[in-house]
Image: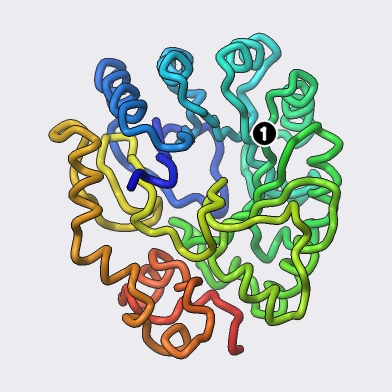
Amino acid sequence: MIPYYVNWATTDRCNLSCLHCRGTESEELSTKEALNLVEDIVGLNPPYVTLDGGEPLMRADILDLLAGFSEGGMTTYLITNGTLLDEKLIGKISDLGVKLMISIDGATKNTYEMIRIGANFDQVLKNARDCGDRGALKAISMVIMKPNFKEILPMIELAKELGAEQVIFVGLKPPKEVNFESLLLTPDQYRESFSAIAHENGIETFVDEPFFKPVIEELGLSRDEKCLESGILSNQGGGCIFGKYMFIEPDGEVKPCTFAPMSFGSVKDKRLNEIWNDMMSSDFLKKIWDPSTRKGRCGSCVHKECMGCRSRTFALTGDWFETDPACPLGR
């Protein structure tokens, strides 16, 4: 088995301050260490790799890292807030065969700039449109929360206008600085949001939320064939993919999930394939993957493939196996 994909947060530096930021406080890998990691990721041969941050474009060597993946024949996506892009940089990234994913958490200027503090909505749209014009805009990504869920349909229309191939809707995870409950959707708001996403919208849509499919089924809605779920771009079945992909922190620590407060080792000490083998033999991960270990509503739920978001559950309850508090099912 190989990872569903590898997600590498290349830096903890960022030029914005977003409401929902998970926060990173770690020293990033040197250029030499980072290039070695590029070789390791290529050698592991996941279907694709995503690079983000912080803001990955704040790394002076980011084009060198992208070139390494390109030379290795790796499908590569760069996730950026879009503020630092210009036509020259877009051209260089596009020439490497790398596709861009731009995070835009609001379809209106007021909503967007309230969530992504320090960003200029009009400038980001111009930069995204320039990416679309070059055929380099893979997706627009939006984290769904109370301040923006009413803008799901306008966001879909905006993404089409900008020339994106897809829209990615990401479920909210506990942020570093803001109270989670103040941003988390209510069960009814989740149902409203998922209903909007599930209908024919004329663009491919991904939902990174394990209970998306079960909620749609409970509502009696059939998903548009262009509407998929599970992971940033993972079509390998629904549900939480904790430990089935690799998340690499800026300092090289490897985690089973972006939001998991645990590491399986550092790329400074071990080769990436060794860490992956350790993950695959982990008794803890095997227990996580076993639906029978779930408690509460998750334990009695008929949608065993969902399993809830394990990292979010642990952050909010202190128990890896409890019910996902964000899940609207049975409420």
Three-letter residue code for mark 1: Lys
Image location of residue 118, percent across then percent down: 62, 37
Give whichever of 189, 290 is nearer the camera. Answer: 290
- Residue 103 in the image: state x and y as whole percent: 63, 41
Residue closest to the far front? 1
Residue beneath label 1, please?
138
Please state which of residues 150 and 111 is positioned toward the viewer in this rendering. Answer: 150
Picture layout, residue 79 above or below residue 243? above
Placement of 325 over or under 132, stated as above or below: below
Residue 274, compared with residue 20, is above or below; it is above
The residue depicted at 62 percent of the width and 29 percent of the height is: 100
- Does the rendering let one see residue 54? no
Secondary element at image label 1: strand
Location of residue 277 in the rendering, given as x and y in whole percent from the top left corner: 21, 46
Residue 184 place in picture, x, y as percent:
59, 69
Q: Compared to 244, does 62 lie above or below?
A: above
Answer whether residue 107 is visible to the viewer in this image: yes
- Which image quadrant for residue 209? bottom right
Looking at the picture, tell me which residue is in the foreground, 59 or 304.
304
